[in-house]
Amino acid sequence: MKLLEERIRRDGVVKEEGVLKVGSFLNHQMDIELLDAMGAEFKRLFADAPINKILTIETSGIGIACMAARHFDNCPVVFAKKAKSINLTGDQYVTKVQSFTHGKVFDVIVEKRLIGPEDHVLLIDDFMAMGAAMNGLLDLVGSAGATVEGIGIAIEKGFQPGGDSLRQRGYRVESLAIVESMDAQTGAITFRQL
């Protein structure tokens, strides 16, 4: 998606250790017009899939997932919570996820009543690095007996194995921008040509 690539080049900040900061437009402060265009692109990419639910993980994927849901006939968005709270009631699906950004392991939780065997799920997240968050979401969907129709990623780090690993396992992964390389010294970003 050229619009997203251009925005990353203009406003993204390359940091050491493979970190790309996009907080000024994607996951701290959100550019709603850009997110809406991204949602429309996810709909175009997955137009042939019978998606009736979108699943993401808190927190940064929620805005993208909500804007995408508007283009999927306002299907519900469910987000896996990273912390148990008094608001989580009843039976739950729980799995563990290692966060690349935070460098720690989280329990991620979805109430069982929110996803079931009748659901055809699109997984959405802001970043794909090692694939840990997606593997956790896949585990939750599998526990629910639901069908994964695809995985939509805003920005994939193509120099890390997450996306390619999921593709090799047979999952349909559509990333709007795939960063092939980044240089923290110069700020240069190279995108994979799709």
Image (tube, grey):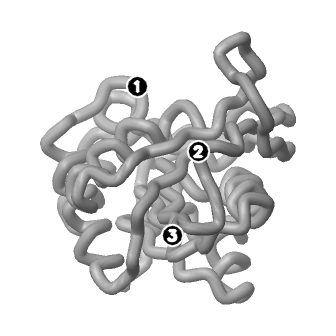
Using the rendered view, name the quadrant where residue 137 is placed: bottom right
| Other residues around mark 3 within 10 Å, as few (<14) / some (14–19) / many (≥20) | many
Of pointers 2 and 1, the one earlier in the residue sequence: 1
Q: Secondary structure at mark 1?
A: loop
Residue lying at 69% horizontally and 61% vertically, measured from the top left: 141
Percent coordinates x, y for residue 54 in the rendering: 46, 55
Q: Secondary structure at mark 3?
A: strand
| Other residues around mark 2 within 10 Å, as few (<14) / some (14–19) / many (≥20) | some
Instruction: Relative to 103, say whether 66 is above or below.
Output: below
Which numbered marker is on residue 120? 3
> Which amino acid type corresponds to the residue marked 2 in the rendered image?
Leu
Percent coordinates x, y for residue 27 in the rendering: 41, 33
Residue lying at 78% horizontally and 38% vertically, measured from the top left: 92
Residue 130 seen by the camera: no
Using the rendered view, name the quadrant where residue 11 is placed: top left
> Which amino acid type corresponds to the residue marked 1 in the rendered image?
His
Question: Alpha-carbon distance for marks 1 and 3?
Answer: 29 Å
Question: Alpha-carbon distance for marks 2 and 1?
Answer: 27 Å
Residue carrying label 2:
114
- Residue at the left extreme of this rendering: 33
